[in-house]
Image (tube, grey):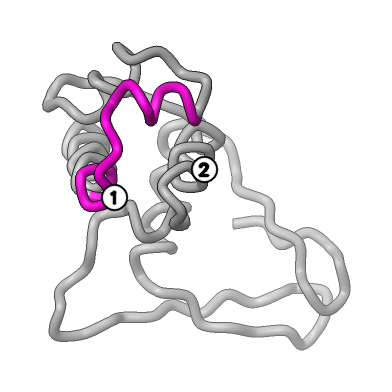
Amino acid sequence: MEELELYNEIGKNIKNKRKELGITQEELAKLTNYSVSFIANIESITFQSFSIAALNNIAKALHTNMISLLPKVSNYEIIRKKLKCEHCEYETEIPIELSDFLKSIKEITHKKVRLTCPTCNKKIVI
């Protein structure tokens, strides 16, 4: 998925969730301490980039989580990828959309993503 398409799909999901809850753009702006124009631009088909922190704040204001606002994979099959810790035996499967999201973060920021292993508390670098 291209970067523009990714932002637009997330924006559509935010708009749908906001409308589902009966919240206006103005109310969402107040709940998140963002401007109405920022919220409107995210929800429109214009290119409005935003941080993961902003996505997290919006998700919290909409009483949901970030993953629920990401584009969905095929409804027929949920593909999972393995995530392994190089320091211990910990291994888990993550949904492909989360894996793709982490990949997008790497592409956008040009930095590796670091997660903390829940078993040994050391960094897992993706």
Q: Quadrant of residue 40?
A: top left
Q: Which residue is found at the position 29% from the left and 50% from the top?
A: 21
Secondary structure of the residue carrying numbered label 2: helix
The Cα atoms of the two marked residues, 1 and 2, are separated by: 17 Å
Sequence order check, earlier mark of 1 and 2: 1
User: How many other residues sit within 10 Å of disc 2, few (<14), some (14-19) or many (≥20)?
Assistant: some
Q: What amino acid type is highlighted by mark number 1? A: Leu
123 part of magenta stretch = no
Q: Which of these two is toward me, 43 or 118?
A: 43
Task: Look at the image and tell me whether residue 55 can be seen.
Answer: yes
Secondary structure of the residue carrying numbered label 1: loop
Q: Which of these two is toward me, 75 or 81?
A: 75
User: How many other residues sit within 10 Å of disc 1, few (<14), some (14-19) or many (≥20)?
Assistant: few
Does residue 31 appear left or right of residue 86 in this picture? left
Seen in the picture, residue 105 relative to 115 is either above or below; the reply is above
Q: What amino acid type is highlighted by mark number 2? A: Asn
Q: Quadrant of the C terminus?
A: bottom right
Name the residue that disc number 2 marks.
Answer: 56
Does residue 6 appear left or right of residue 84 in this picture? left
Does residue 28 appear left or right of residue 20 in this picture? right
Name the spot of residue 41 as percent of width and height, x first: 24, 19
Count how many numbered circles sit on residues in the image: 2
First to last magenta residue range: 17-31
Name the spot of residue 89 as percent of width and height, x first: 77, 87
Seen in the picture, residue 56 relative to 87 is either above or below; the reply is above
Name the residue that disc number 1 marks.
Answer: 21
Name the spot of residue 13 as percent of width and height, x first: 23, 48
Q: Which residue is found at the position 26% from the left and 30% from the top?
A: 24
Name the spot of residue 30 as percent of width and height, x first: 46, 22
Does residue 117 appear left or right of residue 64 in this picture? right
Q: Which residue is found at the position 24% from the left and 37% from the top?
A: 11
